[in-house]
Image (cartoon, helix red, strand yellow):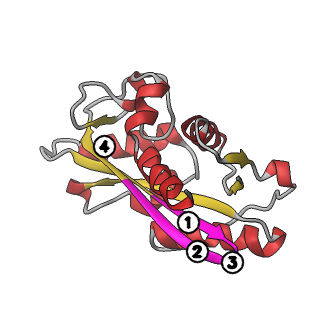
Amino acid sequence: MQLIFASNNAHKLVEVKAILAPSHVEIKSLNEIGFYEEIEETGLTFHENAALKVRAIYEAKGINCFADDSGLEVEALDGQPGVYSARYAGKHGNHEANNQKLLKELNEKPNRKACFKTVIALMLNGKIHYFEGRVDGVIATEMSGSKGFGYDPLFIPDGYDKTFADMPAEIKNSISHRKRALESMLEFLK
């Protein structure tokens, strides 16, 4: 089965392709289908943002596709940055600024519990289906590691003593929120 992954995030594309490699699903990128428009994430929830993306692709191309919206929710910050994770410090995709802002906001806060969440919207023959994944952990007091992207240098998943950015991709991808959501989607597609 072939599906379009509705994302312009190159890091996510690599991660999703690696996670789905052993499955029966072949992933194509937006570039491979000639879709270059930027889809604005104006939703107030992960569900809404993921749905906006798949609707835009399906309306433009009539192709089955899926999209994710993911983010970091920090307990001491009432769930922030949440849907604003990619633009927490202002500019979309400035990982360094987002991480620095998060460290500043958590400065001297004892509660560092957090979770990564992913919601996948799958547009299949004109109908949307949702799948969720979550991984719990804590926010480190300083950045560590060079792998991954986003908040990976700060997030330590429960049961581990390293950040996602300190882990080999195979380990991170085996326990991540995105992996869990993708597994649910694959189960549905069987």
The magenta segment is: 119-133
Upstream in the sequence, badge 1 or badge 2? 1
Residue 161 in the figure: left or right of residue 14 = left
Regarding residue 24, the answer to whether it shows in the image is yes
- How packed mark 1 is, by other alpha carbons closer than 10 Å (few <14, some 14-19, many 20 or more), is many
Upstream in the sequence, badge 4 or badge 2? 4
Upstream in the sequence, badge 1 or badge 4? 4
Q: Which residue is mark 1?
A: 121
Regarding residue 42, the answer to whether it shows in the image is no
For discs 1 and 3, the disc positioned in front in the rendered view: 3
Residue 122 appears at what percent x and percent y?
59, 65
- Label annotation for residue 128: 2
Quadrant location of the C terminus?
bottom right
Q: Which residue is mark 3?
A: 126
Label 3 to label 2: alpha-carbon separation: 7 Å
Please state which amino acid type lies under the numbered disc 4.
Answer: Lys
The answer to whether the residue labelled 4 contacts the one labelled 3, judged by CB atoms less than 8 Å apart, is: no
Please state which amino acid type lies under the numbered disc 2.
Answer: Ile
